[in-house]
Image: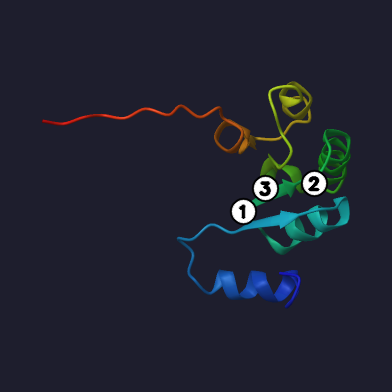
Amino acid sequence: IRIYGMDAAYRVAKEAGFMKKIEIEVESINDAVRAAKLGADAIMFDNMDAGSIKEAISMLNEKGLRDSVILEASGGISMDNLVSYAETGVDVISTGMITHSARWLDFSLEVR
């Protein structure tokens, strides 16, 4: 997206057909509004703090864009801050913490 721009990336993705959903990853409030105006099916707030996400959702509500898009929070979300992200009003929360920060277990299986 950074190379070609959000508008161009959206147009290319839209050419894939009406059966495909388009999710745009954003890192700012302005980009979230822009993505919603473009017609994204989903917006992923990547590495944004809960306060900024809440502000972005408020802006989307003010502009009448909130109900037309699925909102996802991602990046830096852990069990310690999960509730604050849930309280923002996003529809989906994704976290890699449960996989990349999991404690490992070394075991083996002997088959005879």
Q: CA distance from mark 1 to mark 3?
A: 7 Å
- Type of amino acid at the residue the image marks with label 1: Asp
For disc 1, the marked residue is: 41
When the figure is inspected, residue 16 is found, relative to residue 29, above or below; the finding is below
State the mark number for residue 64.
2
Q: What amino acid does circle 2 point to?
A: Gly
Q: Is residue 10 above or below residue 29?
A: below
Q: Locate residue 98, reporting x and y percent.
A: 57, 31
> Of label 1 and label 3, which has the lower sequence position?
1
Residue plotted at (59% across, 75% down): 12
Which structural element holds mark 1? loop
At mark 2, the secondary structure is loop
Spot occupied by residue 82 in the image (x, y as percentages of width and height): 71, 25
- Of badges 2 and 1, nearer the viewer stands 1
Mark closest to the chain's N terminus, 2 or 1:
1
Specify few, some or many for label 3: CA neighbours under 10 Å numbering under 14, 14-19, or 20 or more. Answer: some
Residue at position x 66%, y 47% from top? 69
**Percent position of residue 104, x then y:** 51, 29
Q: Residues within 10 Å of mark 2 (few under 14, many from 20)?
A: few
Disc marking residue 68: 3
Cα gap from disc 2 to disc 1, whole angstroms: 15 Å
Residue 39 left/right relative to 30: left
77 and 99: which is toward the camera: 99
Q: Is residue 3 above or below residue 46?
A: below
* Image quadrant where one finds the C terminus: top left
